[in-house]
Image (cartoon, rainbow, N blue to C red):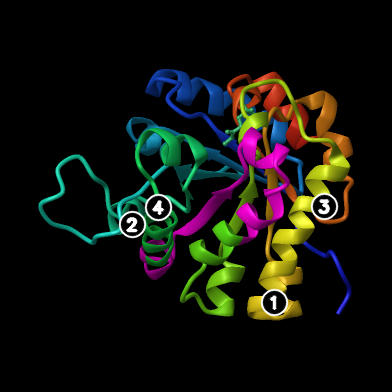
Amino acid sequence: MPKNMRRKVIAGNWKMNMLPNEAIEFISRLENEVKDTKNEVILCVPYIDLFYSLLAVQKTNIHVGAQNVFYEESGAYTGEISPKMLKCINVEYVIIGHSERRQYFAETDETVNLKVKASLKEELKPIVCVGESLEQKETGKTENVITTQTEKALKDLTGEDVRNTIIAYEPIWAIGTGKVASANDANESIKKIRGKIKELYGEDVAEDVIILYGGSVKPENAKELFSMSDIDGALVGGASLKVDSFSKIVNFDK
Ligand code: 13P
């Protein structure tokens, strides 16, 4: 099987930004800028923007994702949203286990795994975030941290499930700091994640699974990052809030 036939995926994570009118306006401007790309374009928007964004992306090549989901189907869980709820309005993707959720909202490897399984059951594609802190990096724990997070997130999944899952390697020290991992370091970490998937699910699955880099991705560094053997695109925070910078990242190969 030829290696690295994977598509490139550029996903924006708006985090807690953008009101519905801003989302609609953003999409109407982005649409034209990305209409000719072969790369997959995803916008992960706040819950309040989902419905408006889904209407706005009709007849475009832009996909919509959420930024979190709960793992139960329904019930007395005030304030939570289930995979079935997201799926029924046609949301395609959901970010699970972002480091900000692990840090501020007590997300654990176990809840990440429950959310991944519940999402896949509804055919909602998870974008699972893994990544080491600065302290873990400086004490040589990166490989152990990211491969363990990956293994725990994917626990009990089939190979087919894993193919429908995107992994985002986001070193915490690179998020929102302007400090991007070097293309080589990011590629090496992503290779370790792919290696773990190979160990668990075999080479074919490992070669198919999309693994993104995230952390201070900008138009200026995107091309170098995306030219690496194992980096299949990016999860973009700050630079996804402006049409100009986000579309330049999507169009890195133009
Ligand atoms: P920045 O691109 O702002 O560093 O954020 C990365 C991120 O957390 C994407 O999920």
Q: Earlier in the sequence, mark 3 or mark 1?
A: 3
Look at label 1 and name its amino acid: Glu
Is 119 located above or below residue 47 in the figure? below
**Few, some or many C-alpha atoms within 10 Å of disc 2 (few <14, some 14-19, many ≥20)?**
many
On the rendered image, what quadrant is the N terminus found in? bottom right
Q: Find residue 83 and name its label.
A: 2
Q: Nearer the viewer, residue 95 or 246?
A: 95
Q: Which residue is mark 3?
A: 188
* Mark 1 → mark 4, Cα distance in angstroms: 34 Å
Q: Residue 233 vs residue 153: left or right?
A: right
User: Residue at (39%, 33%) from the top-left corner?
Assistant: 104
Q: Are marks 1 and 4 in contact (CB under 8 Å)?
A: no
Q: Earlier in the sequence, mark 1 or mark 4?
A: 4
Q: Secondary structure at mark 1?
A: helix
User: Residue at (62%, 19%) from the top-left corner?
Assistant: 242
Look at discs 1 and 4 and give the one toward the viewer: 1
* Mark 2 → mark 3, Cα distance in angstroms: 33 Å
**Few, some or many C-alpha atoms within 10 Å of disc 1 (few <14, some 14-19, many ≥20)?**
few
* Mark 1 → mark 2, Cα distance in angstroms: 29 Å
Q: Are marks 2 and 4 in contact (CB under 8 Å)?
A: no
Magenta-drawn segment: 118-147
Q: Which residue is mark 1?
A: 199
* Mark 4 → mark 3, Cα distance in angstroms: 35 Å
Q: Find residue 179 and name its label.
A: none
**Few, some or many C-alpha atoms within 10 Å of disc 3 (few <14, some 14-19, many ≥20)?**
some
* Mark 2 → mark 4, Cα distance in angstroms: 11 Å
Q: Nearer the viewer, residue 39 or 239?
A: 239
Q: Secondary structure at mark 2?
A: helix
